Amino acid sequence: MKPGIHPDYHPVVFLDATTGSMFLTRSTVTGSRTIEWETPRGLRTYPVVVVEVTSASHPFWTGSRRIVDSAGQVEKFRRRYGRET
């Protein structure tokens, strides 16, 4: 990589605001808060970034998808626009 033109890429802890789960990864984003994280080399301090949705809280990954009543939606459409089959 060309020196001086790329942002700092460093370890960051992401905190899910909904579930409270955390994971350590690398990113260019920085947070104002820090957290102590246990690593194989001992306790380290990393910046924390709070996010609204992660795989721990997203409906696709948790399996808690909302079931849509498609038949009810069709009937509602037909009542609203006066179409009958």
Image (cartoon, rainbow, N blue to C red):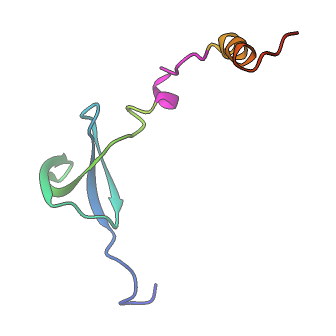
Query: Is 40 positioned to the left or the right of 3 in the image?
Result: left
Residue situated in front as seen by the camera: 12 or 70: 70
Query: Is 71 positioned to the left or the right of 10 in the image?
Result: right
Quarter holding the C terminus is: top right
Query: Which quadrant of the structure image shows residue 38?
Result: top left
Residue situated in front as seen by the camera: 46 or 33: 33
Query: Is 76 positioned to the left or the right of 78 in the image?
Result: left
Residue for point 16% across, 48% down: 37
Instruction: Answer whether residue 44 is visible to the viewer in this image.
Output: no
Residue for point 60% across, 17% down: 68
Query: Is 76 positioned to the left or the right of 15 in the image?
Result: right
Is 62 part of what is drawn in magenta? yes
Where is residue 69? Give x, y as percent.
Answer: 63, 13
Query: Which quadrant of the structure image shows residue 62?
Result: top left
Is 67 part of what is drawn in magenta? yes
Where is residue 60? Give x, y as percent.
Answer: 52, 30
Instruction: Answer whether residue 60 is visible to the viewer in this image.
Output: yes
Where is residue 59? Give x, y as percent.
Answer: 47, 28
Instruction: Find the magenta span and give its range.
Output: 59-68
Q: How many marks?
A: 0
Residue situated in front as seen by the camera: 53 or 44: 53
Question: Hey, which residue is sitting farthest right in the picture?
Answer: 85
- Up the image or down, 20 lies above or below 6; here it is above
- Up the image or down, 54 lies above or below 42; here it is above
Where is residue 70? Give x, y as percent.
Answer: 68, 16
Residue for point 52% across, 22% down: 65
Dominant SS in magenta: loop
